[in-house]
Image: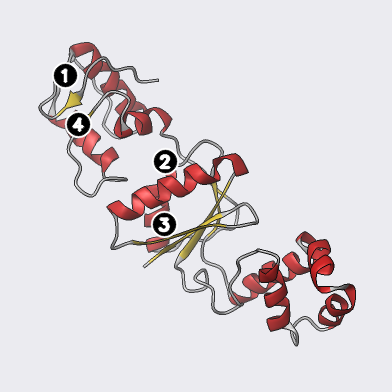
Amino acid sequence: MMTLTQAVGKGCPNRPADVKSLHQRLMDIGMIPCYVSQGSMDDKILKGIIEVQTHFMRNPDGVISVNRTTHRFLNTWSIKKVSPGVQLPGKLLTAWDLVNPLLPKGSYCTSGYRSAEHQRRILHRFYKTKYKSTIIAKYGKTKYDAALADMLAHEDEILSMVRGVGQAIAKPGRSAHQRGKAIDVGGPSTIDNQQVKVIKLVARAHPSLLSGKVIKERNGCVHFEIR
C-alpha cells in the first residue's frame, strides 16, 4: 500500500516521505524507470502520475490527493489476465489496456473479437445447457424440443427465448463482437458494479475510443463496446 500524508504532484506539498512512497509505487507498476529517489518531486515522477491518470482522466492534472481517485487506483493497480484464445485486435487491445489495471481484483477478459460461428455456439450453449430449465419452465417442453430438433432453422425463435429469460445476446453475424467492437469482462458477481463504474469512468475519459455502452449481463459478464 502506498501511504500518503499530504498531496503529491504538481504544485503540492510533496513531503519527502510521500514522494519516496509514490516513487516506489510508480516503479513497482512500471510507470517510471528504476532509480534512487532523494524524496524530491521530479519530471519522471510527474510524468508517471500523468501516465496513470491518462487511463481515467480526460485532462490529467498531475496531482494525487490523499485517498482520492488517483491514490486509490495506484494502490489497487494490477494487470488482469486475458482468457486463453481471446482475440483483442487493434483498438480492442487499446481499450482493454486502458481499463485493465483499474478493474477490481478478480476481473479478467473473457471475450473480444469472435466469429459468427463462435457467437452461434454461445447461443446454442445458452439454449441447450445454461438456461435450458428456465426456458422450458417459461415456454414449455414441446416448444423447446421443436426448436432443438433443428436449431439453425429455428435460430430466431431460439434467440427470442434466450433473450426472453433475461440473457442479452446478439444474433450470430450481428454482434458487436463480430465487428471487433466489444469486450466482455468476467469475475465474481460481487464486483460487477465496480467493473461497470470503472469502465464508464474510462469511457468518459476516452469518448473517441469507448462508446460508453456498458451492460451487466445475466451470465455474469460485463459487456462494453468501442467505437
User: Circle 2 — which element?
Assistant: helix
Q: Which mark is residue 101?
A: 2
Q: Residues within 10 Å of mark 3 (few under 14, many from 20)?
A: some
Marked residue nearer the N-terminal end (1 or 2)? 1
Q: Where does residue 13 sit, x and y in percent of width and height?
A: 14, 18
Compared to residue 194, the image places residue 86 above or below, namely below
Location of residue 43 (image quadrant):
top left
**Are the residues tagged 3 and 4 within 8 Å (C-beta)?**
no
What colour scheme does the image use?
secondary structure
Residue depth check, mark 2 versus mark 4: number of the one nearer the observer: 4
62 lies left or right of 158: left
Q: Tag 4: residue type?
A: Val
**Are the residues tagged 3 and 1 within 8 Å (C-beta)?**
no
User: Circle 1 — which element?
Assistant: loop
Query: How far apart are labels 3 and 4 at the CA level?
Result: 28 Å
Q: Residues within 10 Å of mark 4 (few under 14, many from 20)?
A: some
Query: How far apart are labels 3 and 1 at the CA level?
Result: 35 Å
Compared to residue 72, the image places residue 223 above or below, namely below
Q: Which mark is residue 14?
A: 1
Q: Tag 2: residue type?
A: Pro
Residue located at (42% from left, 40% from top)? 101
Residue located at (84% from left, 68% from top)? 136
Query: How far apart are labels 4 and 1 at the CA level?
Result: 10 Å
